[in-house]
Every structure is written in C-alpha cells, then in structure tokens.
Amino acid sequence: MKLRTVLLAVPHRTVAAVILLLLTVLSTPGCHFGSDSSAGDDGRIDVVATTGMVADLVERIGGEHVKVQQLMSAGIDPHQYKAAPADRIACDRADVIFYSGLHLEGKLADMFEKLAAKKPVYAVADKLPEASLLSSDGAHDPHVWFDVSLWRQTIPVVRDALIEHDPAHAEEYRRNAAGYEAELDKLHEECKAALAGVPESQRVMITAHDAFEYFGRAYGVEVHGIQGISTESEASVKEVNRLVDLLVSRKIKAVFVETSVSERNINSLLEGCRAQGHEVRIGGELFSDAMGDKGTPEGTYPGMIRHNVKTVVEALK
C-alpha cells in the first residue's frame, strides 16, 4: 500500500503526529539517511592530536590509515590552551587521542584523564626515560622535541599504539616508524654540525621563555629564558635586569622572539640594554611550542627544527 493511501485512511490528527515525528527525527543531529550515512566513514583511524609536533608524528607513522585532527594550530600556546566545545566533541568522537604530556597541555589534563577511562589516550613524552628529562622548580621540562634524538624516542609510543588499535596494518606502521627514525637520526647530526660552526663563546640564546634547554644540552648552546618553562609563570623585574646585565657584559648582539609567545618581555630587554648604551637586535623568530602553518616547510617537525637552527646560526655568527 502506498504511503499516500495510508495517510488518507487515518485521522488527520494521526497524520499530523506522524509528520511531526518524521520532522523531529530528520532534524536530530547525527541522524542521516541515504548516501549520507557513510559520510566520513573511510576506514581510517580518527585521531585527535594536541600540538603540531604530535600531529606530525602521528601522520608520519600512520600514513594513509589515520585522519588526524590537530587541536592547536600555528601560533597557539599549549601552556595556556583551554578546550573549546568543538575540541571536546572531537575528542569524544575520536578513536585514539595523542598529546605531548609532561604537563605541556596542563589545562587539558582533566579532560584527558576522563577520556582515558573509555578510549585509548597516550601522552607520548611521558614514556621517555626519567634520566633523559630536565627539570625546573620541581617539574619536568616538557619541551623535549628540541632534542631531535630525544623526540625520536617517542616514535615507538605512537607506532605501538596504532598497531594495537589496527593490527591489520602493523607492518606499514613498523616500516613508517623505522623510516622516520632514520630521518630524525640524520636531522640530529645535521643540527650538531650546523651549531658546531658557531664559535662556542658566541653560542648564547636568549628567548621569551625557557623552552630551549633540551636544544642547548643537545647542541652545545647556552640558553636563557625570561619566563620559566611554562608561559603561565610571570617574568620578574629581577630576571629581566639579570639578562640585561648578561647581554651588556658579554656584548651579546641578538635575542630571539617566539611565534607563540608575546614579544613584550623581549622588548623590555632591548630597552634595558639601550639604556646602558648597548644595542641588541632581534635575531629572528623561533618556533617553540607551536610549529608553522600547515602546508609550509615549518609546518612539519623537521622543517621547524631546520628553520630554528638556521635562524640561530645566522644570528649568532
């Protein structure tokens, strides 16, 4: 019997109720009919990653089998980041979640802890050996990606997580991971060679916040940050004055700004040095807690590292 015939055979009130029910169902979020029912269901693993560094890691290892949504875009400070409603929805829908860890994304900690009770959630840097980590004021420094040889050690965390979730493509994940490990081994040696070309007495980096200690340890650079390892800390007048004295006494000519941190404190350094008759310039902009825009060389982890090394070497030479 055709639908039109059925509707004609029932009371008008019943017809109205049926129509209202259909309209309600059709307008309910998540309800799809016909060809739309498979939209977005392409067989890939839905992954949420916090920072660009973590997203890049997952994409390199997961390849064509992952679809990664990155929460924090270029220029975003993960120390200060708070989840938006859309982020919470994305995390609820994700198959797997990866974040950096070591309290880098401190304001998201509670959300990830709750999500871990119902789906796989991985903090890649939390798996690094304790002995390899730097600490400041009783907390581990989370900026481990600036030592390429240390960030390389997070690859197995992502590889094994993807294999556990998708064992059918285990060999591809292993192959991608091995290839990326080899690439980062070469990048690490490239960084060492580039910085070795700067006289040791000139290898001094002063930046907006203390994000480059691992970089300094790995590549023989003396580093100083105006703020601590988290941008939530406040820069003290005492610390600014100390760094002004350092710049003046050692005749350091360049300091560095960061893409994800305000230039306000760096400008205070420049003014303090100028007041003492010492001119200091901005040696360039470094990527610290966020990579560059997607689709640019600096929007990849190796490209970001190369940009930073090139900027530092040219400024310090």
Image (spheres, grey):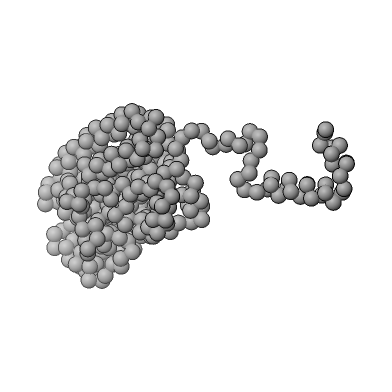
* Direction bottom: furthest residue: 237
The residue lying toward the viewer, choosing from 184 and 35, is 35
In the rendered image, the vertical position of residue 42 relative to residue 315, given as above or below? above
In which quarter of the view is residue 168 placed?
top left
The residue drawn where x is 30% and y is 42% is 157
The residue drawn where x is 78% and y is 47% is 18
Residue 258 visible here: no
**Left/right of residue 57 with respect to residue 41 in the rendered view:** left
Q: Quadrant of the N terminus?
A: top right
The residue lying toward the viewer, choosing from 126 and 22, is 22
Q: Position of residue 248 (x, y in %)?
A: 17, 63
In the rendered image, the vertical position of residue 234 relative to residue 88, given as above or below? below
The residue drawn where x is 86% and y is 37% is 5
The residue drawn where x is 41% and y is 52% is 117
Q: Position of residue 180 (x, y in %)?
A: 29, 34
The residue lying toward the viewer, choosing from 183 and 280, is 183
Number of numbered discs: 0
Residue 110 visible here: yes
Q: Position of residue 16 (x, y in %)?
A: 82, 49
**Left/right of residue 236 with respect to residue 93 in the rendered view:** left
**Left/right of residue 164 with respect to residue 8 in the rendered view:** left
In which quarter of the view is residue 62 placed?
top left
Q: Position of residue 145 (x, y in %)?
A: 27, 47
